Amino acid sequence: MFKQLIVKKTGRSYLNGLTTSDLGEPDYTKLLSQHDAYIEALEMCDVAIKILPKSEEFPDSTFVEDTAVLTSEFAVITNPGADSRNGEIKEMEHVLKEFYTDIRYINAPGTLDGGDVLQIDKHFYIGISDRTNEDGANQLKRIVESSGYQATIVPLKKFFHLKSGVSYLGDNLIIAAGEFVDHPDFVQYEKIVVPPEEEYSANCIRVNDFVIFPKGFEKTKKQINDAGYRTIEVDMTEFQKHDGGLSCLSLRF
Ligand code: CIR
């Protein structure tokens, strides 16, 4: 069960943020209404939500997930791998002090984005990507192992972040796309396999009684519903244009 979520409003500078996609320019008005709808979906999940104000200084800062890794006992402030995003952690450290007394840190030269970290019960999977380096992944591994968790480091082949291609629904069930469909590190889980044309939907979040899921990926949605989960769909097109998955818009603990 999650009790608390943190989200952050999207500033106009988002339009100048980082992207590797060729899906076109985001529409700011649509972006804001999609973010509002994301918050409305979370409000249906029986959680408290802290909404941080937008920041024009940090164009990508609406993707709060990359700034921290949270457990029920402690928080880890990351060291985001993109220079333009690194300063986002200052605000998040301040915010997390409201909720945590035990705060740990990923330190340079280690880099780590929260999008590369997937928690499955007491096990953390930590991706090595363009944003998370080996040093950062090893630092997080040591931190979580020292608190009784297990950790596996997973070098990525194609995905932007680990969680771009794999999510956990609970009850030993993952959703996997691309390189994670047959990945040896995930063989022990039941799988919903995402077809290649719906790859973006591998990134979704289970929040208590619901799975929040991106709109427009019917085959995968059906598999989730058939597995017994209720879905709430949110339109993510304007975030997808800047490589943002659904999970990146919140921190959950
Ligand atoms: C970035 O390049 O950092 C942002 N435009 C997208 C971050 C997406 N974050 C995530 O998937 N956890």
Image: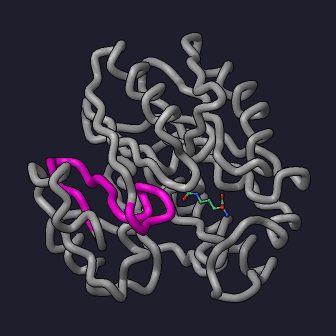
- Is residue 162 shown in magenta? yes
Front residue of this view, candidates 46 and 105: 105
Could you say where residue 73 lies in the image, as x and y percent from the top left? 43, 18
Which quarter of the frame holds ligand 1? bottom right
Front residue of this view, candidates 183 and 87: 183
Count the marks: 0
Report the quarter where the N terminus lies. top left
For image coordinates 50% across by 32% down, the residue present is 135
- Looking at the picture, the colour scheme in use is one colour
In the image, residue 120 above or below residue 217: above
For image coordinates 58% across by 11% down, the residue present is 101
Q: Range of the magenta residues?
A: 157-176
Q: Quadrant of residue 2?
A: top left
Left or right side of 146 for 249 = right
Left or right side of 156 for 98 = right
Left or right side of 160 for 157 = left
Could you say where residue 119 lies in the image, as x and y percent from the top left? 34, 40
In the image, residue 148 above or below residue 3: above
- Is residue 94 shown in magenta? no
Could you say where residue 50 lies in the image, as x and y percent from the top left? 66, 40
Could you say where residue 7 lies in the image, as x and y percent from the top left? 65, 48
In the image, residue 67 above or below residue 144: below
For image coordinates 21% across by 68% down, the residue present is 181
For image coordinates 48% across by 57% down, the residue present is 161
